[in-house]
Amino acid sequence: MNDSGEHGEKKMSRRPSQERTSQRDPERTRAAILEAATREFAENGMGGARVDAIAERAGTNKRMLYHYFGDKEQLYLRVLEEAYVGIRTAERALHIGDRSPEEGIGELALFTWRYFLEHPEFLSLLGTENLHRARWLRQSVRLKELHSHLIGELSQVLEQGKKQGVFIETADPLHVYLTIASLGYFYLSNQYTLSTIFGRDLIEPAHLNAWERHIVHVTLASIKR
Amino acid sequence: MNDSGEHGEKKMSRRPSQERTSQRDPERTRAAILEAATREFAENGMGGARVDAIAERAGTNKRMLYHYFGDKEQLYLRVLEEAYVGIRTAERALHIGDRSPEEGIGELALFTWRYFLEHPEFLSLLGTENLHRARWLRQSVRLKELHSHLIGELSQVLEQGKKQGVFIETADPLHVYLTIASLGYFYLSNQYTLSTIFGRDLIEPAHLNAWERHIVHVTLASIKR
DNA sequence: CAAGCCGGTAACTAAACGGTTACTTGATGA
DNA sequence: TCATCAAGTAACCGTTTAGTTACCGGCTTG
């Protein structure tokens, strides 16, 4: 009997694929392109991003990029979609309804701020996409349902708070989320011009911590009775 | 006596410059290029903006653009500088110290929101400049002093409010301004992705008015005792 | 009134860009 | 063991781009 029965496993006696890296590994190549593209688009925008630069950053070449993603625009859309999936997935794991309404909202504000802080590329991509009036996001079929969950959960927490008499009756879930996102997004995405014109380095840890507290304070002050 | 003595006036008997428009009018050409560039940069960012497109929009050609502004980067910086001068000049005319502290802050919030609403190109330019980490703004020598006035005046209003016992002691002028700007900037500059993912058209007048009231409410709620 | 300068035009150039083609390499299964 | 097909490479292509050059024409001034 020969060794033909072992075909189901990837492991082989000669040249295991793990040893010689980045050779014949479609998954790895694909992921590398996506990550490289995320950085390139985040740093340079859609118009400024270079396909050659993405290929080089990914340690491959243009042919593979076009093979896996079609063209520059489709690659950009995939990058954007993955970025949204990233934050919404992490957000879901919060379960802001588990604590008191006040703590829940504070938790969401803190999470959003820290996620923005740790994922500057997400903010950049949002900026780029809005510059183009959501031209590519609008084409996405994957993302519409991703966001109803957020508003739904937030709405429940607000309702509970109103019932308990700690939140004002006019508190609106979308407004609360936009408030939280506004305060985090603007501070971070505009830190460079702001630091320049006001002569203060906003990315300094002391200022970052002060703004984190400020976001929670403002958010709660705006809905507390 | 001949007509040589009239050389001081632009008016002449043959072909007054006003009749045949856009011919031999350096001021007009210069202004047209600046305005066209503002729109082109705002719509497409630094990487996406096309020099040919600017020239065409201005009703002239590239030669003039390079003649008056040097190159694409210098033109972009002039556009950015003019945009900042625009908002800060309008802001100065407010005189927020003339009314009560509470009204003064509300006034500033309303002004900022409405200015952002009426000048989407300003928001776009800020976004573009921040994508590039204020690379060009940092080179500007004109703008540093333009912003101390804003913080100074705001600081006075806050101090007055604290003395009167209507504002909390921890209210900080930079934080207050950033709060106001955050709420306006994020809502407008990210309206396209937000409208898409949340399925609500945020630019609708009813929503705009609601957010305007929300900004004033949040700003005052965050500093009132 | 002639000379020269300045506002303006259009065609051009070298480089960079997105995208493609022709080809090589290596794993798989009959 | 050899045919097949997917992974990967690199040179290439037509177009677009920022920036330049050569030139035109009317206004100002000595």
Image: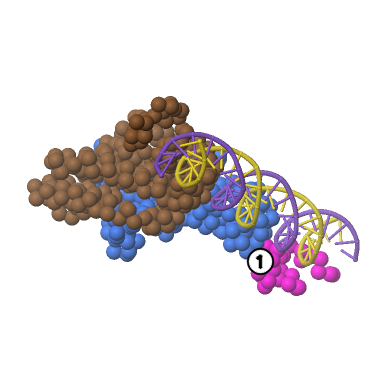
Chain colours: A brown, B blue, C purple, D yellow
**Is residue B95 in view from this perspective?**
no
> Which residue corresponds to the image point at 31% horizontal and 38% vertical from the top-left?
A115
Q: Is residue A216 magenta?
A: no
In the image, farthest residue toward the front: A1
Query: In the figure, is residue B174 to the left or right of A165?
Result: right
Report which residue position mark 1 lands on: B22
Q: Which secondary structure lies at badge 1?
A: loop
Query: Residue at the spot x=31%, y=34% of the render?
Result: A210
Q: Is residue A11 above or below residue B9?
A: above
Nearest the eye: D22 or A175? D22
- Residue drawn at (28%, 45%), measured in percent from left and top? A88
Could you tell whether B159 is left or right of C25 in the image? left
Which residues lie in the magenta part? Answer: B1-25
The amino acid pointed to by label 1 is Ser
Tally of numbered discs: 1
> Can you give x and y, in whole percent of width and height, for residue A42 in the image?
44, 43
Image quadrant in which the C terminus of chain B is located: top left
Magenta part, dominant SS: loop
Does residue B6 appear left or right of residue B127 in this picture? right
Instruction: Give the image quarter of residue B148.
Output: top left
User: Which residue: 55% across, 39% down?
Assistant: B139
Residue B102: % across, % down: 27, 49
Could you tell me which quadrant the N terminus of chain B lies in? bottom right
**Mark 1 Cα-neighbour bin, 10 Å: few <14, some 14–19, many ≥20:** some
Question: On what subunit does the disc labeled 1 rest?
Answer: B
- x%, y% of residue A5? 33, 34
Q: Which of B56 and A78 is in front in this view?
A: A78
The answer to if B12 sits in the magenta stretch is yes
Q: Is residue A160 visible?
A: yes
Q: Where is residue A135 in the image (x, y as percent from the top left)?
A: 42, 57
